Image (spheres, grey):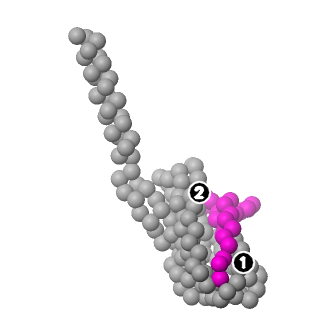
């Protein structure tokens, strides 16, 4: 009987732990980091859009990102997105960007790109800049969203 009770208690404890893990996140939300617009980055190989927009990720180990953009006319080019990191939201990594993404444009067709970054113990990411490497055509309708789980 003792063995049966011990087994039953262990089974109940295991079920409680499994249920707690399954309910680890109570909410999910997508937050706007940069919201659309036209002619966001003018045509020039050296133009960049500097934002400084900050993502608070103090309770996250990963962050999902969505980029949406297109060019004003038919062409192709690659655009570089730079993020810097901070542990306190005040002092930012300065020796390099920390995280870099390269996205290829597809003329006037909207590019939707999603990815996730593993940030580990880093509490904050800042969108530093987005470059336009196309010397003749502006990057437009630029939007950036990020997702968090709470």
Front: mark 1 or 2: 1
In the picture, the disc for residue 77 is: 1
Residue found 62% across the figure and 59% down from its top: 85
Residue 126 relative to residue 21: left or right: right
Res. 14 image quadrant: top left
* Residue position marked by numbered label 2 in the rendering: 117
In the image, residue 54 lies in the stretch drawn in magenta: no
Residue 101 makes an appearance in the image: yes
* Residue 40: x %, y % from top left: 61, 84
Give the structural element (helix, strand or loop) at label 2: strand
Q: CA distance from mark 1 to mark 2?
A: 23 Å
Magenta segment: 81-107
Is residue 38 placed above or below 147 in the rendered structure? below
* Residue 111: x %, y % from top left: 59, 75
Is residue 25 placed above or below 78 in the rendered structure? above
Residue 124 makes an appearance in the image: no
């Amino acid at each position: 009987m003792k063995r049966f009770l011990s087994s039953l208690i262990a089974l109940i404890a295991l079920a409680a732990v499994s249920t707690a893990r399954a309910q680890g996140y109570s909410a999910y939300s997508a937050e706007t980091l940069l919201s659309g617009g036209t002619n966001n980055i003018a045509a020039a190989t050296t133009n960049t859009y500097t934002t400084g927009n900050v993502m608070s990720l103090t309770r996250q180990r990963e962050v999902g990102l969505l980029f949406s953009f297109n060019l004003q006319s038919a062409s192709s080019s690659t655009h570089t997105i730079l993020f810097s990191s901070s542990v306190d939201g005040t002092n930012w990594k300065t020796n390099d960007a920390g995280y870099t993404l390269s996205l290829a444009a597809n003329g006037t067709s909207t590019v939707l790109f999603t990815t996730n970054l593993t940030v580990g113990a880093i509490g904050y990411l800042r969108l530093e800049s987005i470059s336009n490497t196309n010397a003749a055509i502006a990057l437009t309708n630029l939007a950036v969203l990020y997702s968090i789980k709470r």
